[in-house]
Image (cartoon, rainbow, N blue to C red):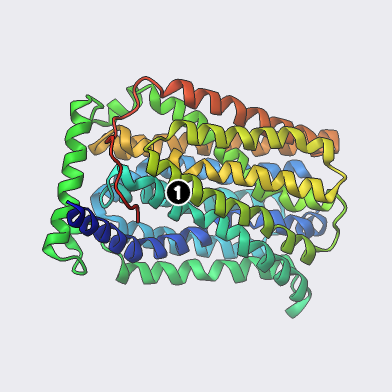
Amino acid sequence: MQTATTDTNSVYRKIAWRLVPLLVLGYIVAYLDRSNIGFAKLQMSHDLGFSDAVYGLGAGLFYLGYSVFEIPSNLVLRRIGARLTFARIMIIWGLVSGAFALIETPLQFHALRFLLGCAEAGFFPGVLLYMTYWIPATRRARFTAFFMSAMALSGLFGGPLSGWVMSSMQGFGGWRGWQWMFIVEAAPAVVLGVITLFYLVDRPEQARWLTDAEKDVVKRDLDKEESKQRQASTGTSILDAFRDRRLYALGAMAIALLAGIGGISFWLPSILRASGIKEIWQIGLLSAIPYLAALVSQQWVAYRSDRRQERRWHAGVCAAIGGLSWLLMPSFSDQPGAALVLLTLVAAGSFGATGPFWSMPGALLTGKAAAAGIALVTTFGGIGGFIIPIIVGWATTKTGTLAAGQYFYGAVMLVAAGLLVWGTRAREAPVPTQPATEVP
């Protein structure tokens, strides 16, 4: 029995090492290209005369375009496969991201942010759906956390990179540092898109790097899981996804996490500068600290969630920690050390919730309902990601302080944590009582 378990673990470890690195690299670049306007703002807003309201609208418009195309993209992925879908997404978003170096007006900024969202839509929900083809739900939180560690890694390396490019390339070739930052950080997306065409495999049965016995292990586990889901009457049609009330509780948490994590990426440089740190390269280096804590928290919480086979409380408590930290931040806005500590707690709580939370939607439904359901949850998050930065940007412009936005982020995360724990408690999909002895 122990041998069988060990063999199963080795199969999923093999899958992880084959698929996850490329997906993580893709999402590192994706998150960097969507969030690097937080650093660009330190120079761009002055150069182009953009107010915080203009910036907030641009930050939010990304998620409007993202939301419009998420569900269609996931349905297309089911038809044409992940390889073509992800390659198309990466190449287009890379080209759009590089075009930000040429903007001169708010209209151009807003149009490109919307187009970037349209281009990138489908990658994140597509990966969540793609994982359901390869990995059973009992192991998926850890895999999901590996993938979503890209956000923390993007901030960990992207902040120092953005600060260095903006400082060292300022004036090179007659361009400003923020313009070079967009060019430098957009190029990897196009390269990865081309690599994806030759590297990725759509389904386990197509994988030449798996033996027939290994393919049988994956098929057996996924078939067993689908059978249990059907017995739980979770539904298999697209309409079932919209009828399932649990998904709306998940949608509330998606809004909160996207808002909280987006708040970090969009406003962290501005919060650090407002606390008294003026040099861009220093802000870049210090910005890595919250993301380092986020990376550790993300992996530890996901590992604990998989071992205990519990999702709701792991995600809810982490989100509550992030929300409380946002609420405390205005009281320490002029103290660099305290501001950095609270930003670190926000990052650790928000990112810690991602592994257990994003493994939940794929465990609730099967078939077309899974594709639509996952995309529906991320669409809720995208709508919140569109509206909330606009509110925060408007409030910042009107009040002249970041405090109102920080209170808003905190309230949203606390409310969503309560809704998640309460709204999914009675009908959560059943999981085995005995977890695997090792999670890859």
Image quadrant assignment for residue 234: top left
* Quarter of the figure that contains the C terminus: bottom left
| Residue 60, above or below 130 | above
Q: Nearer the viewer, residue 330 or 130?
A: 330
- Coordinates of residue 64 in the picture (x, y in percent): 54, 40
The answer to whether residue 73 of the structure is visible from this angle is no
Residue 423 seen in the figure? yes
| Tag 1 residue | 121
Position of 144 relative to 182 (above/below): above
User: Residue at (44%, 64%) from the top-left corner?
Assistant: 91
Quadrant assignment, res 406 = top right
Decide if residue 390 is on the left or right side of residue 79. Answer: right
Residue at 64% across / 48% down in the picture?
Answer: 110
Q: Position of residue 307 (x, y in %)?
A: 38, 43
Q: Nearer the viewer, residue 378 or 249?
A: 249
The one of 299 and 200 positioned closer to us in this rendering: 299
Given residues 70 and 295, the one toward you in this image is 295
How many marks the image carries: the answer is: 1
Q: Residues within 10 Å of mark 1 (few under 14, many from 20)?
A: many
Does residue 188 appear to the left or right of 42 in the view shown? Answer: left
Q: Quadrant of residue 170?
A: bottom right
Q: Position of residue 419 (x, y in %)?
A: 51, 23
- Given the image, on which type of amino acid does mark 1 rest? Ala
Residue 113 point in image, percent of width and height: 59, 51
> The residue tagged with tag 1: helix, strand or loop?
loop
